Image: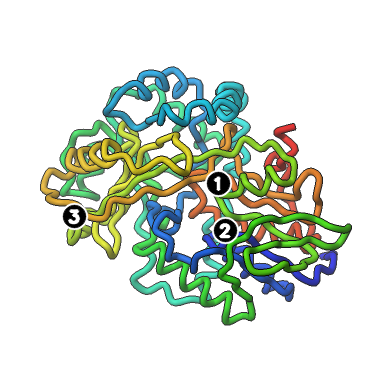
Amino acid sequence: MSTVKCESVGIVGAGIQGVCIGLQLLKRNIKTTIFDNQDPGTGRNMASYGNAGHFSPYAVLQLNRPDVLYDVPKMIFSTNGPLALRWNYMHKMIPWILGYLKNCNKKSMLHTAKYMHQILDHSLSAYDEIFEEIDTTNLLEKKGILYVWTNQNLKSRKLEIKVRNDLGVKQKILTVKEILELEPNLKPVFSGGVYFDYAYHARDPVGILKKLFDLYIKKGGIFKKENVNSVNQSTLNKTIIKTDNAEYNFEKSVIACGAFSKKFTEQLGEKIPLDTERGYHVHFEGMDKLISRPIIFLDRGFGMTPMNQGLRAVGTVELGGLKNPLSKKRIKYIVNCAKELLPQLEEYKDEWLGFRPTLPDFLPVLGPSKNNKNIIYAFGHHHLGWTLGAMTGKIISGIISGEKTNLDLSPYSSSRFG
């Protein structure tokens, strides 16, 4: 394996992407420094604090689908649906919306599915490698993930099943009876489902992130709790990360700060249509034993995960940027969905809003900046950031060290946006 010697790397972002990239770089004996203005796992609006905790290697299909596009106007104008738009942010969403419309066709849908599958297919094995080095007791469960649906959108469900079959994704189609055998406490308001029995889920996503960060520090990684103002490439082999406190020089730098990455790409002169899917959660304390594994109700765009904090109900896609406040309507929608499947649920706690970085073709950006080859991008994983953390670490560290790969990385390049 031929490699290119890299002396040092700075990473902007201490979420699951940044920490996994850091671990993989240390494995290659590359001096690594991670920057963030918060300690890993402590920021309440960070994705790792409040995500669904799913490791979802099967999730190849995204929202750039003709069958979904047909329902978008109806969902946006409904006060009780899985998709919402903050109208005060509409004008800022125009580049993303135009890109989405361009990518919402069968050809683009299949392109996205193919190249999501390429990296998702390795996502669990990539995590298994690093999970061998930490204690995941009470943090990780391997009980599969269950999707349920009604007969309302059977055409869409058949499309999903076919695309996954064509790509070789393992799935088990279940009847209502078979679903209730797995999860007897559910109210049978659904008509069928699919079971991915090999999927994992986190009982505590923050707990896992902190363990991985501790491993990063133990292996010699450096962390700077500082606010990063800019990243630029000054010479052929020198990049500069400027914070509120100082200026740091590295041979290469990585931008891996999710929905907050756009600030830096714009500084570098790249018009990448990165925007934000706002996701919500609540907890039902002491109710996690009602189900054994994550359940996603596809018709509602919502899911539930048994976690150490309780039963976490998550979901909806709200397009509204980083600055709008939490929407009580979105919280009410999630609570109502949870009680539709589990009427025995009582009061909830811990209203949460977090930000998923989203691109209009629903593929992440992985690879060098178009104009600054020593600045590497690793963002835009939308709701699969948690699933793809370890795999992103392997891809980005491979790019930095010049390793050859059998993966076709061109579909993830920022140059696709012109």
| Residue type for callout 2 | Gln
Mark 1 secondary-structure assignment:
loop
Give the mark nearer the N terminus: 1 vs 2.
2
What's the distance in space between the residues labelled 1 and 2, CA to CA? 10 Å
What's the distance in space between the residues labelled 3 and 2, CA to CA? 32 Å
Mark 3 secondary-structure assignment:
helix
In the image shown, does 106 or 413 lie closer to the viewer? 413
Where residue 291 sits: x, y (%)? 23, 53
Q: Comparing marks 3 and 2, which lies closer to the viewer?
A: 2
Residue denoted by label 1: 381
C-beta proximity under 8 Å, tags 1 and 2: yes
**Placement of 396 over or under 161, stated as above or below:** below
In the image shown, does 194 or 270 lie closer to the viewer? 270
| Residue type for callout 1 | His
Q: Which residue corresponds to the image point at 40% horizontal and 53% vertical from the top-left?
A: 51
Residue denoted by label 2: 17
In the image shown, does 403 or 251 lie closer to the viewer? 251
Residue denoted by label 3: 290
What's the distance in space between the residues labelled 1 and 3, CA to CA? 30 Å
Q: Quadrant of residue 327?
A: top left
